[in-house]
Amino acid sequence: MPTSAQHQLVDLHAHSTASDGSRRPADVVAAARAAGLSAIALTDHDTLGGLDEAAQAAAQHGVRLIPGIELSAVERDAETHILGLHLSDRADLERRLVALQDMRVTRARRMVERLNVLGIPVTMDSVLREAQGGAVGRPHVARALIAGGWVTDFREAFDRFLGNHRQAFVPKDQLPVAEAVAMIHRAGGIAILAHPGSQMTRERLAAFAAMGLDGVEVLHPSHSDADAQRIDALAGELDLVRSGGSDWHGADEGARTLGAMRVPGHWLTEQEARVAALASRRVA
């Protein structure tokens, strides 16, 4: 594997069975090694539950693990995902996540109740089986619907029942972006805006930066080349570090295949410099 960060490839956005991915954390790391990646960030939704297993696998496979998370936050009533990368002091974050996990289970239970009212006898036990002990989310309700034969695939589950404003949709309890950023900083990490997309304006990104945001995801499967170029330029203007990844959930689907975004290793070096700068400010 190349030794120069300039030539190494990394993937800084991937999920496991600890949240809504289909591969165990150790298997995500093994897949990263098979893909020729020098580093992988495990960024499960609202949980750190897969990091210990992933760390053991990383040591075995010679792949660097970046401890991470993807927090579901809100900004102006819009769901906004914030990646926390390079987490080093996770105790306080773990405690905060317990409350978020309880909220996730309550939300799933309310969706199940709404589905039952609609005549679909899906159970909470079946949803929890699909979650396999990981953070519960809408994908697990969708999988339970598919397993029960009430829908044929994820698209139908979300289009008919679980998508925003559909009959069984239940909104999440709100975690403000500024609080999500602060939680990540207290854990020793940096906060990255995930998949901002074509609608992200300079004004909004500057507002996030004022909240303490450290970086922005430039490379993501949902971004066109034009999106990536524009977001990269905004990152430079606003002194935000760049990040990117496949947002892998275990399947091999074009750009959503692990490593497909070809994120350069020197972006990781830039992130490490930001982590060090934040640490020095805390000490001062």
Image (cartoon, helix red, strand yellow):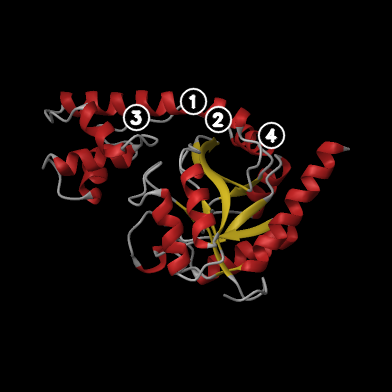
Cα distance between the residues tagged 3 and 4? 30 Å
Residue 227 tag number: none
Select label 3 or label 1 by which is in front: 1
Say whether marks 3 and 4 touch (CB < 8 Å): no
Question: Which residue matches tag 1?
Answer: 98
Which numbered disc, 1 or 4, marks the residue that appears first in the sequence?
A: 1
Q: Position of residue 260 (x, y in %)?
A: 45, 69
| Residue that numbered label 3 is attached to | 170
Q: Which residue is mark 4?
A: 186
Q: CA distance from mark 3 to mark 1?
A: 20 Å
The image quadrant where one finds the C terminus is top right
Residue in the image at 60% along x and 72% along y: 8
Q: Given contact means CB atoms under 8 Å apart, are the residues at marks 2 and 1 in contact?
A: yes
Circle 2 sits on which residue?
94
Evaluate if marks 3 and 2 touch, with contact meaning CB atoms under 8 Å apart. no
Q: Is residue 204 above or below residue 217?
A: above
User: Is 171 or 35 nearer to us in this picture?
Assistant: 35
